[in-house]
Image (cartoon, rainbow, N blue to C red):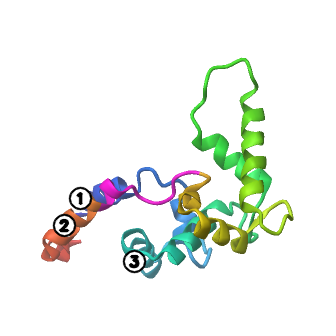
Amino acid sequence: MNRKKLQKLTDTLTKNCKNLFRGFDEDNDGYVNVSEWIYGLSVFLRGTLEEKMKYCFEVFDLNGDGFISKEEMFHMLKNSLLKQPSEEDPDEGIKDLVEITLKKMDHDHDGKLSFTDYEQAVREETLLLEAFGPCLPDPKSQMEFEAQVFKDPNEFNDI
């Protein structure tokens, strides 16, 4: 398989995954090495709920401080929601959504989400895994990627 084909495959797998780099760059050195890439794909394709929660939390924690703040929630929701034409200020609706989200997910009531808050909320309702936007591949893209990659392992010899 040549580089172009591999790039096309991974683009298909990750097309809806914003901030993919932050989740894959485990040591935060600004590079995704081979081990990080393989581990990231492992989480994408066969990850446990725990691994996916850790990955998504790292993607959502925009400043890397170990918490998802109101500002981070606002930023991610604003970028992932469709704009609706209305007379109302769209930012007000997003602020309301952030407050609703905090009421649902902030179990220790400190005004931000720790991993513990996030984990507890996702365990109670798995739909909250990608509460702030898509960061995992959709099942169709995942199946297409696996079908292509696993049909002939010898095809990777020329990369």
Badge 3: few (under 14), some or many (20 or more) residues near its Cα, within 10 Å?
A: few
Q: Point out residue 31 in the picture as x, y percentages from the top left corner.
A: 53, 71
The answer to if 140 sits in the magenta stretch is yes
Residue underneath mark 2: 1
- Residue at screen point 68% across, 63% down: 61
Residue underneath mark 1: 5
Q: Point out residue 35 in the picture as x, y percentages from the top left corner.
A: 44, 82
- Residue at screen point 78% across, 48% down: 99
Q: Which label lies toward us, 3 or 1?
A: 3
- Highlighted range, magenta: 133-142
Q: Residue furthest top?
A: 87
Residue 37 found in image quarter:
bottom left
Q: Do the residues under discs 2 and 1 have CB atoms within 8 angstroms?
A: yes
Q: Which label lies toward us, 3 or 2?
A: 3
* In this picture, residue 50 sits left or right of residue 45: right
Badge 1: few (under 14), some or many (20 or more) residues near its Cα, within 10 Å?
A: few
Camera-side residue: 19 or 7? Answer: 19
Is residue 139 visible in the rendered structure shown here? yes
Please state which amino acid type lies under the numbered disc 3: Ile
Residue at disc 2, secondary structure: loop
Please state which amino acid type lies under the numbered disc 2: Met
* In this picture, residue 87 sits left or right of residue 85: right
Residue 55 found in image quarter:
bottom right
Badge 2: few (under 14), some or many (20 or more) residues near its Cα, within 10 Å?
A: some
Query: In the rendered view of the protein, which quadrant contains the N terminus?
Result: bottom left
**Nearer-N-terminus badge (3/1):** 1
Q: Residue furthest right?
A: 110
Please state which amino acid type lies under the numbered disc 1: Lys
